Image (cartoon, helix red, strand yellow):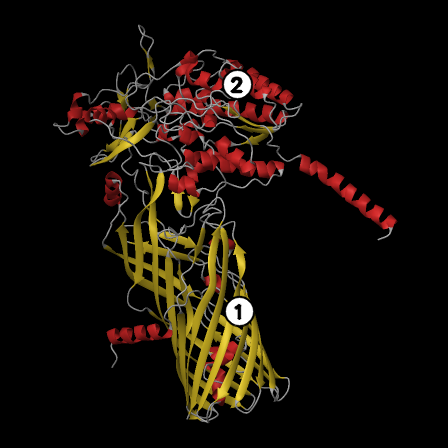
Amino acid sequence: MLNLKSFRLVSGAFLAVALVAAPQAWGAGFSLYEQGARATALGGAFVAQADDPSAMFFNPAGNAFNEKLTLYGGAFGIIRPTADFSGANPFPGSGSTAAMKNPLYWIGNGYGVLPIKPGSVNLAVGFWTPAGLGVPWENPDQFSGRFISQRVDIRQVALSAQISAKLADWIAIGAGPEIRISDVKLSQNAGALNPFNNRFTDVGHLSLISEGTPVDWTWNAGILIKPCDRLRFGASYHGNVKVNFSGTATLYQIPTGYPDFDAAVAAKYPMNKPLPGSTALEFPALLTFGLSYDLSPKLTLNVDANYTWWDVFSETTITIQGLPTKHIEHGWNNTWSIRGGLGYQASKNVWLGVGALYDTTPQPDFDVGPLLPDANRTGASIGAGFQLSHMFRVELSTLFIWFHERTTTTNENNFNGTYRVFAILPGIGIKSTF
Amino acid sequence: MKTSSLFRSLATLAVAALLAFPAAAQQADFTTFVTMGDSLTAGFTDGCLVDYAQRDSWGAIVARAAGATFEQPIIKSPGLGPCTYLQRLLLTSSGAVPVFGTRPNTGVPTNATLARPYNNLGVPGFTIHDLVTKNPTTPAGGLTYLILRGLGTQLQQAAALKPTFVVIDIGNNDVLGAAYYATALEGVTLTPMASIVPDLDQIFTTMKAAQGGTGKGIVATLPDVTSIPFVTTVSPILGINPSTGNPIYALTDEDCPGSAPVCQVTPGSYLTLLSSSYLAQGYGIPCAILSPSDPRQANCNKPLPGNLKINPSTGAITPGVVLTPAEVEKIRKRTAEINYQIVTKGQAAGYKVFDINGFFADVVAHGRNYGVLQVSTAFLTGGFFGYDGTHPSSLGYAITADEIIQLINAAYGNNLPRPDMSPFLFNGNTSSGGYPSGGALSAEEQLLWAAGIFHPDTFQELVQYSLPEVSARRSIPGNPHGTPVSPNRETPRSGEDRVN
């Protein structure tokens, strides 16, 4: 029997495999919506189509129609040609510029569908990455927002087992429990006024790393309706999860060159030793509904809408022993996003797809800052699927996301300026049917 | 295009231009920008007038935003005052003990030959009456002469410049003396309203006339000078009685019941920064709370001087150090009376009002947050005030200037850029090389200056480990002012030689 320690090790491994780190969430806020290459090629509009194993995320009911053991594995790379910030007066000032680091990130997913009653009742098991956040700033010790955040990483992977059932030829449902495994890392500098030279100075570096892999439960469900041959309606739901993180924080002292000042700082704060810390993050519920319509035998139109209950992300409290408790107000709003895609069966073995999306940000201006600079975004996607054999199919997609330039004037910490981000997410998926 | 259509278009444009003209004409014109006032206007900090601080006087920062010419009576470093600096910060069981030093008092003017009045006419120490009357004509006039240079009173020189925009910030020294001397005496440390009202009338009438019959500019109210670090830093509570749980207050000779020579200070009293040197020697401390070997036993149970004292033979004044609630009330009442006159008379003359009183109260209550770096009015650790505990630092002046700029933009429809606070936060000022660090003191000087003046929790918020925190978003700054603090100075300057 898997004991708790082993389970945590396994779940931690899943986390590492699924999500090396998302540089920034690619659904609004810090949700992720890229869970399958075929769906992504269609702009993510897939809830009423859901005809590959990634249906576990997009609509669990879709797997009810599966007739064979099917495995699916995929990954997305994340490249950010542009991810920068220009400051404004009074702070950090019009001369302040910064960029986010841009290593190659990737996120992964994997699904398996096992027919229990082929074409009617199926068991699906899989994992995906419903949320993630990574905002690492270049030159972190010079970045003007370093006292707010130098780097934040939130990783989360979902594990699920679902039962899907075709109730009739025109309707199917699916549902299952969903385990979320998460971790978080934060780092920033601490500043204080040096009374010897009247300058705010870096006096410490704070690093907070969650320990273990918090495991929390929620559920998912979906329904797929085919009122006629050419038209399908779908809806799916993923529940919200509140994750309690605990871990270790360390405040490393940074010498200032003023021994008296350093001594005063060291006398006041627990420097250079591990301190128990904790925080909690609540991840929102997601409702998706949409339609899929065959414009012709080869051409299909998908249109989806997402509604995300971001209002659960209203406040974060961070407690570190020996340091003042921090309450961070977020005040996020529930959001809509719209997705559309066209799929074209170009030949027996070649499928083409294009898509677009518009995703509204849940983040109010006052919360937009170095920790998480979110914005409305417009996306465009292309993709193709190739049936290599009766067993293997490969799908490729690329999603381009333009974060709308966002200029803040009311940041709660008076850290204002303009954020610009453009990203490219190439994706691949391989499906094996047995 | 047909000719008639062209004419119609031109006529439309002309009408539109005429309609737009009044709005454009209301914008503040910085062709000739003048600032009037006292030490706060002069850019005084750390007990001195010195170039690196003057270059960031609030007037200079506003002028840079407006692209205006702004000549100032720059005093070359090391300044005149003398300038105070922090030499050591000694950690003791009772808290951090600052050790201050002073720089050589040898600054010289660098802009003394300017053939016209300065744009910044602020004179340290000036009261409202001084602005109207003082005009020293010889170097014996000290700083006042260096700034006014015998060219007329401050009011006369400001009027002579015919400013297109003026900011007037005067009156602080009409109440500050009461806080500095911890003694509220009408006609001595508080200027009577009977003197203030006609002087304000003269100021506004003169400036309005010099500006073409309507005041163009801003007039500032006075802050609550009992909220400055000079007043609020030293705690009157010396400890807690372990048997009763009641606070143990410092001892004073002021307002004692009956004819008792010594009593505890009234709850709610403030001890000024000048009390620190007394406390360091044991004055004001009950002997019972000191160990038998404590050297302060030599003076324990002796009172802190509550009110100022005048030596009858020399005329030298020794400030009191205990500001009682009744004295605080008198200072605040007079401040409110002066502010009422400033607002009503200033507005009647056409000036917009910068409510420094409200602004400074907000800074005291909430500070300012720049990227979670929290600027406050706390002495030494807050950043808003300089070492004298009375005058803002360059950062404090910049925050004040930011407030004034926003007021100008809102009231006059200008679009002046707000200042970049980064140089002030991370460099101490905008000068190359930034704010200068202190120098060395002899051991003897250290003993003279050392004083345990802090609340035990003064450094409570020293480190702003800054996981982003929700803090109130405020508008802007104001400030207090007064006389530079020298814990060992018993006799402050007087008359024209006084710098504040």
Within-10-Å neighbours for mark 2: few <14, some 14–19, many 20+: many
| Residue sitting nearer the eye, A18 or B427 | B427
Residue A149's place in the image compared with B399, above or below, is below
The answer to whether residue A128 is above or below residue A332 is below
Asked if one can make out residue A368 in the rendered structure from this viewpoint, the answer is no
Amino acid found under the numbered disc labelled 1: Tyr
Position of the C terminus of chain A by quadrant? bottom left
Circles 2 and 1 on the same subunit: no
Tell me which residue sits at (49%, 22%) in the image.
B171
**Chain letter, disc 1 residue:** A
Q: Is residue A176 left or right of residue B252?
A: right
Q: Nearer the viewer, residue B497 or A295?
A: B497
Chain of residue at mark 2:
B
- Image x and y of residue A86, in percent: 48, 52
The reply to whether residue B230 is visible in this rendering is yes
Quadrant of residue B93 within the rendered picture: top left
Residue sitting at x 40%, y 37%: B432
Location of residue B220 in the rendering, given as x and y in whole percent from the top left corner: 53, 28
Q: Residue B349 or A285: which is nearer the viewer?
A: B349
Q: Which residue is mark 1?
A: A307
**Residue B154's mark?**
2
Q: Is residue B174 above or below residue A188?
A: above
* Element at label 2: helix
Residue B198 pos. (x, y %): 57, 15
Residue count near mark 1 (Cα–Cα under 10 Å), binned few <14, some 14–19, many ≥20: some
Q: Amino acid at mark 2?
A: Gln
Residue B443's spot in the image, x, y percent?
Answer: 19, 27
- The nearer-to-camera label among 2 and 1 is 2
Quadrant showing the N terminus of chain A: bottom left
